[in-house]
Image (cartoon, rainbow, N blue to C red):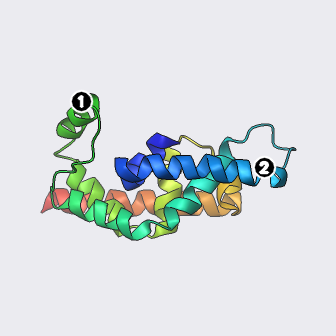
Amino acid sequence: MHRYVHLRLGESAADDIAAETFLGAFRDRARYDLSHPHARAWLYGIASNLVAGHRRAEARRYRALARGAEVTDVASHDERVVQRVSAAMQPRLAAGLAALSPGDRTVLLLVACAQLSYEEIAEALAIPRGTVGSRLSRARRKLRSFVTIEESS
């Protein structure tokens, strides 16, 4: 959960949003549908809704990464190493992510960062499974074309 939010909004927001996610889940535990054996998708749905409230900050973060600006809220040495290794690709990827619609970006990042299945994403976001597939397909296509355009420039 923390990693997913950290990748979306940065370290400073990740602690708060992860805590708010579990607090909200605890507060709304009576509304949880017990027919679902695992609460993972439900929790990611709560986190995604909280991230939605911070979308402007997320878009600013991706634009800063696209400009090649150093992100200063990386906590550990390992994260700093990963950031430096991926520095060449990061601006193009960040610019591509910033260009996606919020719904497409959320679905793409739930697959890539949280490794949720289509069914789990549909449950988390309260959308049909087919919508998950179309959003993911559209996001991949846009991201692929954006990176290809950037590489040829």
Q: Is residue 139 visible?
A: yes
Check the picture and name the quadrant holding the C terminus: bottom left
Seen as rendered, the residue at the extreme left is 153
Q: Tell me, yes or no, whether the two marked residues, 2 and 1, touch with CB atoms within 8 Å.
A: no
Residue drawn at 86 percent across, 44 percent down: 34
Query: Where's residue 49, x and y in %?
Result: 58, 62
Number of numbered discs visible in the structure rendering: 2
Q: What residue type is labelled 1?
A: His
Q: Nearer the viewer, residue 3 or 124?
A: 3
Give SS at disc 1.
Answer: helix
Residue 73, image x and y in percent?
Answer: 27, 47
Query: Who is closer to the viewer here, 146 or 101?
Result: 101
Q: In this view, does 42 lie to the left or right of 72?
A: right
Q: Quadrant of residue 40?
A: top right
Tell me if residue 153 comes above or below residue 7 in the rendering: below
Residue at 48% over, 54% down? 108
Mark-to-mark CA distance, 2 and 1 = 37 Å
Helix, strand or loop for disc 2: helix
Q: Residue 23 carries which label?
A: none
Residue 77's label in the rendered image is: 1
Mark 2 vs mark 1: which is more N-terminal?
2
Mark seen at residue 29: 2
Query: Which x, y percent locates residue 125?
Result: 65, 60
In this view, which residue lies farthest toward the top?
78
Look at label 2 and name its amino acid: Arg
Query: Image check: 58 left or right of 124?
Result: left
Query: Up-down: is 30 above or below 37?
Result: below
Q: Horizontally, is 85 left or right of 136 in the view?
A: left
Q: Residue at x 19, y 35 (%)?
A: 85
